[in-house]
Amino acid sequence: MQKMQEIFGRPVKSDVLGLFRIFFGLCLLYELWYYVDIDLLNMGLRQPVMLFPYKGLEWIRMLPGKGMEMVMFLIMIAAVCITIGWMLRIASVVFVIGFAWIFLLDKGLYNNHLYLFILMGFLFSVTDSDASWSVSKKKHRDTLPAWQLHIFQFQIIVVYFYGGLAKINYDWLLHFQPVVVLTEGRSSKLLLYILVYGGLVFDLLVGFLLLWRPTRIYAMITALIFNITNSIIFHDIGVFPFFMIGTLLLFVDPDFISSRAGRKQSIEKKKSKQASQFVPLVTSGTLKGLMISYIVFQLLFPFRHLLYRGNVDWYGEAQKFSWRMKIQQRDLKEFKITILDYKTKQILDLDPGKYITSAQVLALTQDPQMLLSFAKYIEKDAKKKGIENPFIKSSCIVAFNGRPPQPMVDPEKNLCTIDSNAPVYSWVMPLKNP
């Protein structure tokens, strides 16, 4: 414990976290401006007739009237406050609550970098990242306890490392999928080996190489190339690769940053300052428990896929909040919802676009449970329109990681008869050519 006190309680220059806070705030403002530009609240959340909440979080709903616009406005104000370092902890809490509220309304909104933004917001709410490069002059301090920097480094290493663990699977290692599909088969064998095995090794090791001074500069150069390559190959990850480039700042020697920022001090003054500003590992028992719980959660929760049966990637289970990034590619070939009315002998083909957005349809192909929820909604809607005993079936045909297209569910099965709590493997068709 004494050794841990020395490692995590030792003072480090505060400039690194101050500069990273500014970068994070700017990324938030960019993301929020993008939401305003695409009119997310109306086109993404109000236009569809149904949303797909997370199990256990069904109580998170759209606020009435202009309530969601108010939430978005508060998030923007919070992002500005985070950027300039004013009322940081309060602003971070407001951001986390408001952003998570929008983020958790619908599964179709899920993106790994949005989840990471929420986690980063939480970490800013429990650290003193406004100790430098902020308008809060009274809170300025030359140093911070090292744990406040290390907790951010830990989170970034988790993202990389667990992303690497997810790649240790049959499709990635032996069939080079989904890289072959994403590069449209135009890559040479050598390039495929570099992208597949190089990407795996990079994810597993880069976080630790960034921590070790002798390999840090090489790891940073590799991370820069890796993230730029991702931004070129993947067209649906938005600001994520550029944000990950910015996180490299967290691994730069804090003294180096401070010296380049014009804050270099004499040896004697530096030692005096550090001695006077030494802060114990965590002064609050509550905060210590919170941080330990956070670390344990981040280490264990991504492994929950081991609790599920079968091919969890195909069944879409435990894929979110686990950093299982870009290990599958699904091309939707056909998506139909059909209602059979036994009483009138009518067959009605529904247009899914009149019910849900294209983003929700895409998410639905990756999470079969959403398809079942959609069918249950259609069943209720049909009964309201006078169809007493509807028979609802779906033709959802996808090509998974370069395999021939196959139906996700039996196209002749009545989805109304499936229990919402039934295991996914019991009603989703097995993956062919597994």
Image (cartoon, rainbow, N blue to C red):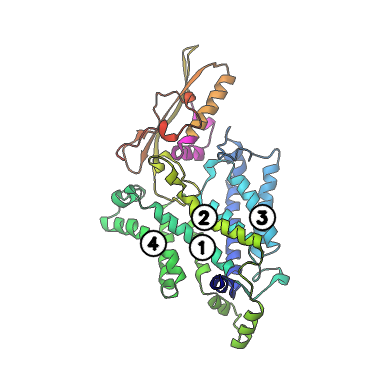
- Say whether disc 3 or disc 1 marks the residue closer to the N-terminus: 3
Q: Is residue 132 above or below residue 410?
A: below
Amino acid type, residue under disc 1 in the picture = Phe
Whether residue 231 is visible: no
Tell me whether circle 1 and circle 2 mark residues in contact (CB < 8 Å): yes
Mark 1 vs mark 4, foreground winner is: 1
Residue 128 is situated, as x and y percent measured from the top left of the image, at 65, 66
> Whole-Å distance between the Cαs marked 1 and 2?
10 Å
Residue positioned most to the right: 138
Residue 275 is situated, as x and y percent measured from the top left of the image, at 64, 80
Which disc, if any, is residue 202? 4
Which disc, if any, is residue 298? 2
The 10 Å Cα crowd at callout 3, few under 14, some 14 to 19, many 20 or more, is many
Q: How would you classify the magenta stretch by its main secondary structure?
A: helix
Q: Is residue 40 above or below residue 173?
A: above
Tell me whether circle 3 and circle 1 mark residues in contact (CB < 8 Å): no
Mark 2 vs mark 4, foreground winner is: 2
The stretch in magenta equals 350-369
Residue highlighted by disc 1: 154
- Say whether disc 1 or disc 4 marks the residue closer to the N-terminus: 1
> Whole-Å distance between the Cαs marked 3 and 1?
21 Å
> Whole-Å distance between the Cαs marked 2 and 4?
20 Å
Of the pair 34 and 422, the residue shown nearer to us: 422
Tell me whether circle 3 and circle 2 mark residues in contact (CB < 8 Å): no
Q: Give the position of the N terminus as an image quadrant.
A: bottom right
Which disc, if any, is residue 93? 3
Amino acid type, residue under disc 3 in the picture = Val
> Whole-Å distance between the Cαs marked 1 and 4?
16 Å
Q: Is residue 380 left or right of residue 326?
A: right
Amino acid type, residue under disc 4 in the picture = Phe
Mark 3 vs mark 1, foreground winner is: 1
